[in-house]
Image (spheres, rainbow, N blue to C red):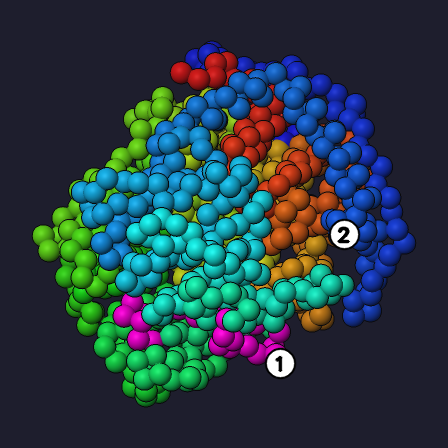
Amino acid sequence: MVLKSLVTRPAALVGVLALSGSALLAQVALQYPQTRKADRVDTYHGTTVPDPYRWLEDDTSAETAAWVEAQNKVTFPYLEKIPFRDQLHKRVKALNDYEKYTAPSRKGPYVFFRKNIGLQNQSVLYIQKGMSGTPQVLIDPNKWGDTVALSLFVPSKDAKYAVYGVSRSGSDWQQLKVIELATKKTLPDTVEWVKVSGAAWHDDGFFYSRYPAPDKGREKASINEGHQVFFHKVGTPQSRDVLVFEDKDNPQRFHTVDTTEDERFAILEISDRGKGTDGNAVFVRDLSKAETTFKPVFGTIGDETFAVLDNDGDHLIVQTNHTAPNWRVIRVDPGNPAEAMWTAVLPEKAEPIQNAGTAGGKLFATYLKDVTTRAYVYGLDGTLENEVTLPGPGVASGFGGARDAAFVFYSFNSLTTPPTIYRYDIGPRTSTVFRRPDVPGYDATQYETKQVFYPSKDGTKIPMFLVHKKGLTLDGNNPTLLYAYGGFNVIQSPTFSAARLAILEQGAVYASANIRGGGEYGEKWHEAGARLHKQNVFDDFIAAAEWLIANQYTSTPRLAIQGGSNGGLLVGAVMNQRPELFGVAIPQVGVMDMLRFHEFTIGWNWIADYGSSKDPEQFKALLAYSPLHNIRKGARYPATLITTADHDDRVVPAHSFKYAATIQELASRETPILIRIETKSGHGASSQQKALEAAADIYAFLLHNMGVTPKKIGS
């Protein structure tokens, strides 16, 4: 952020923070790489739009590679000159150097969980016999390379085999392998070109989804078209896999298959988000009857979603937002799926359903009450049995298990509570701590969390969580990081981050705003921030910043904003609309070109949330806020650190490349405008080391440009 003025802190806080003269070094000394401009102009519905940096969309060209290298030669030396950067790196790593576990899951005689002893790049998958068995390493992805990850793991019903996925350099593409659980041996089976897929077992094989292998010279965009469902039988080559479903007339649809726990039903879900529809259709095959075709249960793709949780005999238990923006659970007979025959299990409530699932012959459902979890146990007929008492306001997830489970596990965390695993015994209805992490040097009693509600531009009340050290002085001088997402029905939950402690322990405030576009209050909240209503998202975020300043938590020079992916778009848009409001901006892997996002990989999948420049009315709305197209010439922007990665095949780096080149060209030279381009990484960090290094660099950049030098780093 731009440091606009220096304000002396009260004497009581001088020991925590001190103003840094080094942060005020003249930014005009930065020399950005010269980026070639081409004479490229597109016409949309009679409006001409220049695109001089179109060549940067080719992220495999030698010229783009040279540009990336030149940008990093500016960015990393800048970061290296921040006096406390190395100390901050060490502190972020030290705070994360503790054992981390996932909740156990069971299949047959085996129990599985993942564990990271501290700073391993990838968590290790363990197997044990029963809850009292000795854990043994089943898969250690660290042996594959620092940036190769275990992406999925699905055991078969008889626990003889498991499918596991391998992702390289953070890519969304997966390679599937099969492991024999008793011997821990990986079999020769190898399945390639898998994307947007799980693995659903049936007998001695599994369903999966993939794209056709590209022919030599095939257009890059078409690699992500023609989603197919196959069945792979264990012990056979991929060339013998059976094509189960495809739709050549609709190449941009997603097709995925799951099976119910008893493997009786195969559930085919189809979505068509590239055409602007936000829901899905569901088709079913009764495998017990050897059916060879999928029959429609919810046969029309619209804006309503149907998710099959499991079956109860001949009936399916389905979660849906059909005529229920806050979701409900229904029972449907796939042989007679007419809406008039549906049976209500969990009617819609004032609070939206967060998750639902079956285990131990029960139906578990979590609801959101002002963005915090409430958990309940029901009979399969919807009869309420009890509420699961949670440790406090926060986020709980899990509660999954087999039909014969006597207990389930769930994880609970909050802004001040590290993820803690609980065991819930279904019979006595009791919860006990199963594993509690020990974050080094962290004392939760030193921090406090509160939830506030502030008015947006149109008067809508927006919730926001704040976490900071106890005894915070509201003098407008606290370094503050404001974060949000605001899209795709995603819930911005108040969750714990050990890395974030590195700035909280320095007296910083972290603010998480639950702006519209997410799913915090159900589908209506989502729709209020989608397509032609997207400006509400930006207004909500701007109002959060104004509230923090008005209530003396911070001031413009010490207010940083951060967001990733759709949140990167958010940061880029509000920077253009209110550049004077923020001191530092961190747009991460952002969707910055709102006119061409649908041209890259599976970007067409986002049309359902954003709209498309192919539509005249939607084009006007997109052009009005597109971060790339609304950069103000000569404007004094916040100190900005753009982040992206060379293997991001979801939001391709071209978004950030073109945005960085444009803002470096047009913005005033009063503040640094840098782009940090990670290698061998994707939309998310491909290893823990890369994630922690990026976090530390972001924190160093924002503190440095706020004029704040940590007085002491570490305990």
**Tag shown at residue 337:** none
User: Can you tell which quarter of the image residue 579 is in?
Assistant: top right
Q: Mark 2 points at which residue?
A: 58
Describe residue 1's horizontal placement relative to residue 37 as left or right: left
Give the distance between the C-alpha atoms of the residues marked 2 and 1, in whole angstroms: 28 Å
Classify 198 as above or below 679.
below
User: Can you tell which quarter of the image residue 202 is in?
Assistant: bottom left
Whether residue 270 is visible here, answered yes or no, is no
> Where in the figure is residue 597, as x and y percent of width and height?
67, 59
Image quadrant holding the N terminus, namely: top right
The magenta segment is 241-265
User: Can you tell which quarter of the image residue 611 is in?
Assistant: bottom right
**Residue in the image at 61% along x and 23% along y:** 704
Give the residue type that dot 1 points to: Asp
Q: Earlier in the sequence, mark 2 or mark 1?
A: 2
**Residue in the image at 42% along x and 84% along y:** 292
Determine whether the residue tagged by mark 1 lies in a helix, strand or loop. loop
Classify 102 as above or below 42.
above
